[in-house]
Image (tube, rainbow, N blue to C red):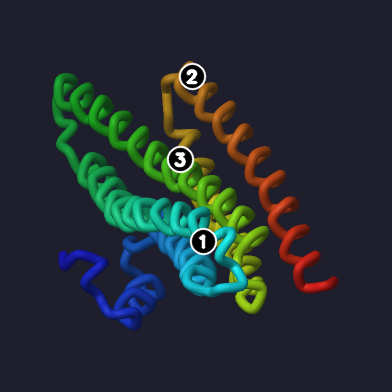
Amino acid sequence: MKDIMQWTLKQVLDKAASSDATPGGGSVAALTGSLAVSMVSMVASLTIGKERYAGVESQCRNILGKTRSLGAEFENLMKADMAAFENLMACFKMPRSSEEEKQQRQKAVQEAVKNCIEVPMAIARASVTALRLAGQVASIGNKNAISDAGVAVYLADAALGSALLNVDINLPMVKDETYARQVRYDKKELEQQAAKLKVEGLKIVNQRLGK
């Protein structure tokens, strides 16, 4: 399969809309996170070099540097999510004629399921970082692009919520209850962080919009 990052936008949309299993919800969540990061980058870029915002230029350059690495992370997670799902499907097709094959298959499935949880959890963590950066750029960025900062907040929050739904659907398949308990705890922490950052970010955006 060709690297998703080499697809045209129409190819991505068509494949996501088709009966093909990938790209699915996790990859779309990562794509949404990438778009959020792009909006943060836009606001920072539109602030740098403007005399009116000279006092925050170094901060915006710092944000821009972080968005570059975060954008690359989301791109890698898009591909990782597709690979994780395809690997899980391959594990389900493993032979189970003998007891030994059944045990090997079960072990492989459990490892694959955990990977299908770890990738969207990584997407969710990256989304929290995107939310934080969106709030930062909203507070200091070019006021003419403040709506784009707000779009970044909404998109990052959507990316997180979407990623965690992919955790929810895979978690019941995990037989390791200690692992599952830790994932549920981490998931709740991410949700709480995101909720706070979303409220704070939108408050800044609305204030600077004069609402």
Residue at image location 39% in from the left, 37% down from the top: 118
Towards the viewer: 97 or 189: 189
Gap in angstroms between the C-alphas marked 1 and 2: 48 Å
Q: Amino acid at mark 1?
A: Glu
- Residue that numbered label 1 is attached to: 57
Task: Check disc 3: other Cα within 10 Å, few if <14, some if 14-19, many if 20+.
Answer: many
- Residue that numbered label 2 is attached to: 177
Towards the viewer: 175 or 25: 25
Asked if marks 1 and 2 touch (Cβ < 8 Å), the reply is: no
The answer to whether 90 is drawn above or below residue 145 in the figure is above
Tag 1 secondary structure: helix
Which residue is situated farthest in the bottom direction here? 10
Task: Check disc 1: other Cα within 10 Å, few if <14, some if 14-19, many if 20+.
Answer: many
Mark closer to the chain start, 1 or 2 = 1
Residue at image location 42% in from the left, 56% down from the top: 67
Tag 2 secondary structure: helix
196 left or right, relative to 42: right
Mark closer to the chain start, 3 or 1 = 1
- Residue that numbered label 3 is attached to: 121
Q: Amino acid at mark 2?
A: Glu
Gap in angstroms between the C-alphas marked 2 and 3: 17 Å
